[in-house]
Amino acid sequence: MWLFLTRRLRVWLIVTVLVPLATGLLRRVGQALERRRGPNPVSRALLQAGDLGDRARARLRGGRRR
C-alpha cells in the first residue's frame, strides 16, 4: 500500500505522524532515565532531541522565530 502513495503524501505522513511520535518517545525515555539515575549526558541528549522535534514542528507551523 505504501507504494501507491505519492512521494509528497509519504513525506507529509512521516512529518506529521512519525516525527512527533518519535520525539515524544525520546522525551519520555529521557525523563524516565533522569528519574531513575539523575541527569546524565544520555538523558540530556534524549531530552534535547525531543525539544528539537518540537522546535522544528513549531517552525513548520509558522511559529515565531527568535
Image (cartoon, helix red, strand yellow):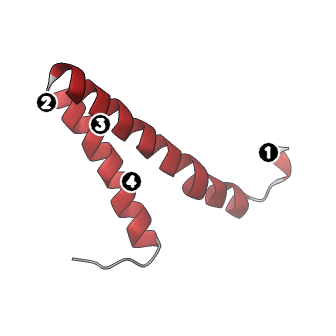
Q: Is residue 32 above or below residue 19?
A: above
Comparing 5 with 49, the one in front is 49
Q: Earlier in the sequence, mark 3 or mark 1?
A: 1
Q: Which mark is residue 2?
A: 1
Q: Is residue 16 left or right of residue 62?
A: right
Q: Give the labeled residue for mark 3.
A: 46
Q: Amino acid at mark 4?
A: Gly
Q: Residue at x 63, y 61 (%)?
A: 12
Dot 2 falls on a residue whose secondary structure is loop
State the separation of the CA atoms marked 3 and 2.
Answer: 11 Å
Q: Give the labeled residue for mark 4.
A: 53
Quadrant containing the N terminus is top right
Q: Is residue 49 above or below residue 31?
A: below
Q: Which mark is residue 39?
A: 2
- From the image, state whether disc 3 or disc 2 is nearer to you: 2
Comparing 8 with 31, the one in front is 31
State the separation of the CA atoms marked 2 and 1.
Answer: 40 Å
Residue 39, quarter of the rendered image = top left
Q: Position of residue 30 (x, y in %)?
A: 29, 33
Q: Position of residue 18 (x, y in %)?
A: 57, 47
Comparing 34 with 66, the one in front is 34
Q: Position of residue 57 (x, y in %)?
A: 43, 63
| Mark 2 closeness class: few <14, some 14–19, many ≥20 residues within 10 Å | few
Q: Amino acid at mark 3?
A: Leu
Residue 27, quarter of the rendered image = top left
Dot 3 falls on a residue whose secondary structure is helix
- From the image, state whether disc 4 or disc 2 is nearer to you: 2
Q: Earlier in the sequence, mark 3 or mark 2?
A: 2
| Mark 1 closeness class: few <14, some 14–19, many ≥20 residues within 10 Å | few
